[in-house]
Image: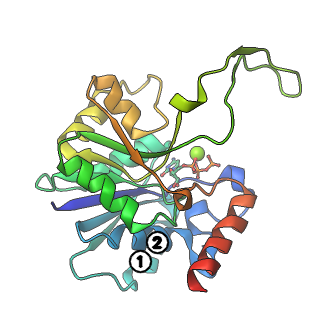
Amino acid sequence: PRTAAVIPAAGRGVRLGPGAPKALRVLNGTPMLVHAVRAMAASNAVVLVVVVAPPEDTPGVRNLLADLALPDRTDVVVVPGGETRQESVRLGLAAVPDDVPIVLVHDAARPLVPVDTVDSVIEAVRDGAPAVVPALPLADTVKEVTPGEKGTPEPVVATPERARLRAVQTPQGFDRATLVRAHDTVPADGEGATDCAGLVERLGEPVVVVPGHEEAFKVTRPLDLVLAEAVLARRRA
Ligand code: CTP
Ligand code: MG
C-alpha cells in the first residue's frame, strides 16, 4: 500500500555537542538526513518522504535533497519543523495527502535502518495493526529511580523485569487516520509523549511491537557517530 514517511529532522542535537543541527552532520561524507531519506525511499511502498527541517535551514535542506537520485515513485517534500519532536511530526503529517493510507515516522537520527525493518513495519500495518513499533530486547538491566540533584545518589524505586521490556526504535508505522487523530487529541499544554506510538496508546488503540534491528540505533552522543561510521565502512567492505 502507498506509504508516506515523515522524517523529523528539526532537532539541534544538543547531546551530540556543538556543531550543525544533528540531521546535517555528516557520516562518511554524507549528511545523516540523506542516509535517512535513502533508507525510507529504499522501500518499494514509499511514494512520499516528508522531511521536517530545522526552520532556519529549510531552504538549505531543500537544496541538499533536490539533487538526490531517488526512485521515480518517491517524491520528497521539505517543511519547517517546530519546538519539540511531537510538534515537528504534527507539521510533517499535515503535508501527507488524505489518500495515503499508511504513514511511517522515522528519526533522521536513525540513518542506518535496514530496508527489511522498514518493510516489516509497513507489512504489520497493512495486516491491520493501527500502530507498529520496531523494538529490541534490552542488554542492560533498568532501574526506576527518584531523580535527585545532579551528582547525588538516587534512590531506587523498582527494577522492572527486563525480559518484558523493549527499547523502541523507528520507523514507527501507523494507519494515517489513527495517527492524525492521536495528534489532534493531545492537549497542547499537556505532557508530551517521547514517541508517536505513545500518543496512540493514550487513545486506547492497540500498539504492537515487531523486531527492530541493531543498525537502527539512534545517533545521540559522540560515540554513536563512531559506531555509525564503522557500520557504513563495514557495509562498503
Ligand atoms: N526532532 C525534531 N524537532 C524537534 C526535536 C527533535 O524534528 N524540535 C527530531 C530530531 O531531529 C531527531 C528526532 O526528532 O531526528 C529524535 O530526536 P533526538 O534524537 O532527541 O534529536 P535532537 O532533539 O536533535 O537531539 P538532542 O535531544 O540531543 O538535542
Ligand atoms: Mg531531543
Which of 123 and 52 lies nearest the eye of the viewer? 123
Residue 167 coordinates in the image, percent (x, y): 54, 41
- Hey, which residue is sitting farthest front in the picture? 163
Ligand 1 lies under 8 Å from the Cβ of mark 2: no
**Element marked by disc 1:** helix
Q: Which residue lies at the image location 46% right of the left edge and 79% below the top edge?
A: 64
Whole-percent x, y for residue 88 in the image: 42, 48
- Mark 2 lies on a secondary structure that is helix
**Mark 1: amino acid:** Leu
* Residue at 59% in and 24% down: 161
Q: Residue at x 52, y 58 (%)?
A: 216
- Residue 61's tag is 2
Q: Nearer the viewer, residue 235 or 181?
A: 235
The amino acid pointed to by label 2 is Val
Q: Are marks 2 and 1 in contact (CB under 8 Å)?
A: yes
Reading the image, the residue beneath label 1 is 65
